Image: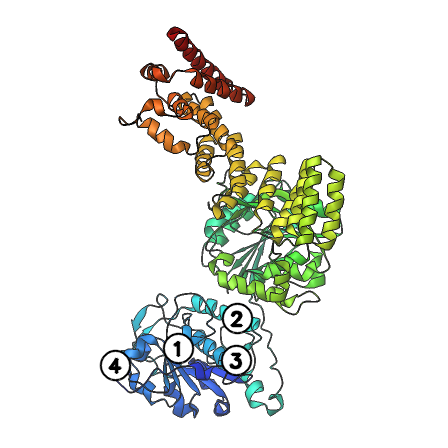
Amino acid sequence: MKSKPQGVASGNPGPMEKYHNIHAGKRCVIIGNGPSLNKMDLSFLKNEFTIATNRIYLGFEKFDFVPSYYVCVNPLVISQSVNEIMAIPSPKFLSRSGEKFFKPNSKLHFLDSLNQWIFSEDPNKGIFEGWTVTYVCMQLAYYFGFSEIFLIGVDHNYTAEGKPNQEVVANGQDPNHFSPEYFNTGTHWHLPDLDRSEQGYHLANLFLKNHNRSIYDATLEGKLTEFPKVDYREVFLNPAKKDVPPEVINLPLPDEIVIDNSVDRPYKISAITSTFRGERFIKGCLDDLEAQSIANEMEIIVIDSGSEQNEKSIVADYQTRFDNIVYIRTEKKETVYAAWNRGIKHARGKYITNANVDDRHQAYALEKLSKILDGNEKISLVYSDVAITTQENANFETGQITGYYLFSDFDRLRMYKNCYIGPQPLWRKSLHDKYGYFDPFYTSAGDYEFWLRIAKTEEFYHLAETLGLYLNSPGSAEHRNQQVSAMEQFHAVSKHLPEGYKTVEELRSSLDKKITLNDKMSEYIFKIGDYFKDGNFPLVLDTLQQAQTEFPNHPVLINLRGMLFIRTERYEDARKEFASAQAISSSYLPAIHNHAISLDYLGRTKEAIVLLEMILKSVPNYLPAGKSIVKLLNKTKQGIRAIDIAKKMLEAAPHDYELKCFLADYYGANNDFFTATHFYSSLLAEIPDFFEIQEQIFNNWLPKESENPNALPVLEKFNRIVNSNDVVSFLQEHETWLDEDLRQFVITKIQEAKALNLHEVVEALSSLKEFIEHYIGQKK
């Protein structure tokens, strides 16, 4: 029967530190409450460490056991089961929200709920509920020290209808749990959120794998597919298997429906497109692929992974118009990598590419990539740079570009630092015969794991052209949960550690080059600098080679090598060096800045601007990048943006000559001679804070009445004259200033302006000199 909330029972939130690693190296069973429990022989539970949840107390007599630990975090279950929970003799772990129903008790502990996607290592600091109490149990099992975790009764299958997490009132007997009285008539309960529960389970699986713990699903006929399946009878009831690692059951793949109206002919490329809830993208994706210059040599394989949207009818329409499209559907959702594997097994092309449903290509992209593989049998995979957009269904030619992924050239060891292969590579299908398929366990790093797997022995090639358009979407698999993505990458690297490294941390530490300069390195750099000044490039190269022998893969030396290539007009070689230095140390700004400069030399000015914007976003006052982007924006007719950045940079560097010249020239070219003259005079008179003076000018600044204007120094007199709105009127009002000292000062400024080729300033100052000379002559 339903339990009404009781006033206050007895209990106490004691400390949990005493449970830390209390069962180190042991195994435990987490017990769900699905109806499959009724089909199992649960006699083994009395001999195992167990963690049970919610209304498991309804089965104590039937199953003849009491759990080692009890967990409940759902507020509805707690509030309606207070007396029953307190009657459980086991240590109890409840949500903090239920604390008001209980009095202190040494076996009662309350958990603070964290509002972030994590797998908590220490419940004393809070715990993430993960939309299922089972996820809480997994975190506690880790904290308790269990090295093997087995699930039973986690059926992951409900007949109730409604929105996930919706509160409902039960009506009749409960078909979703082991007891028909579990949520019986009148009981309030929350409908399950199976999708989010699966995300939590995946996070738990990743965390436990990365920490050398194992978790298995021993549920009888359960629908959950995240964890390796084992037969509970072999694990718990077979004495011969007691100390033997559990044997994992290989589940059959979901059935598929294939609609293939394509012509059976030799294809060069098979483009694999996986879709789940991708109705709004699929039309644009197919248009993009059919518009490829090599489309007549391509087949398109669409894998509909149990989507409830309308992709099928859209693809069917395209199949009536094109003879190279295959449609495959599974009724159950798979990971994207399981879908890719399914498509690859159907593929007839010599080469494979993943055509993500929301990404797009430049019209010649796949033709250019395939020519690289055609021309060199030693290259197994080719990848290119991509532009970034946040505009859905944009195409390569007209989409709003918000950035670029400019990837580094292939380096085996650097692959372990991050995945720089990009979202649209092309690879040989034969690789799958040699190395197998993508690991369907992953949700976002399966491609990275496969690239690491084959990179040990295969050659990759970076085609340094922007050939793709990548949609930067917060809903994508890699962005939806950053922690899961990071943990998957960690797991992938740990599977493929190169020789000589014991841990991922050790490997990554060796790859993160710190910008440190010891005495020997400094000596090399000073030598190289002197040779650069003398233009002795052969000696620069010789010294660099010596230095790189002693300090291999040092970003400072790689950057200097790129600078040498710039000086000798080897711009593509320079770009590769700068990109390599950037890949080794993403915080080494000189290399990133030089990377942008080399891109501009190669005609890739848009990409250069985006790279410079990236620098200024992280370090707003980095002057070299600021000055470079001002030049490139002006070069690409983006004068307003250039002026805005130049003004901001001048605030940080008020004496910078180049910025003042640019601003003066810009305003002069746009017929704003008043503002231009101010900047020119600022240059000549070396005014330290021009913006403050400019503001005074526009406010019709005049000397204070108490000030003796004749006592002003000649520099100040000059500044006030050239910054006045009407120079002639101002001079007439200040005739006493017009003397030989002022004339000589103006002559000096004329000479400086001539040296700077500031012809308009020379002309204006010459007129001022003549006016002064005329006045002095009249006085005589």
Where disc 3 sits, the SS reads strand
> Separation of disc 3 and disc 2 at Cα?
13 Å
Kind of residue sitting beneath label 1:
Asn
Q: Residues within 10 Å of mark 1 (few under 14, many from 20)?
A: some
In this view, 510 is above or below 12:
above
Q: Which residue is mark 1?
A: 176
| Residue 244 position within the rendered picture, expressed as x and y whole percent measured from the top left | 63, 85
Where disc 1 sits, the SS reads loop
Q: Residues within 10 Å of mark 4 (few under 14, many from 20)?
A: some
Where disc 2 sits, the SS reads helix
Q: Residues within 10 Å of mark 3 (few under 14, many from 20)?
A: many
> Separation of disc 4 and disc 1 at Cα?
23 Å
Q: Which residue is mark 2?
A: 207
| Residue 498 position within the rendered picture, expressed as x and y whole percent measured from the top left | 69, 65
| Residue 771 position within the rendered picture, expressed as x and y whole percent measured from the top left | 41, 11
Q: Which residue is mark 4?
A: 5
Tag shown at residue 149:
3
Where disc 4 sits, the SS reads loop
Kind of residue sitting beneath label 2:
Phe
> Separation of disc 1 and disc 3 at Cα?
23 Å
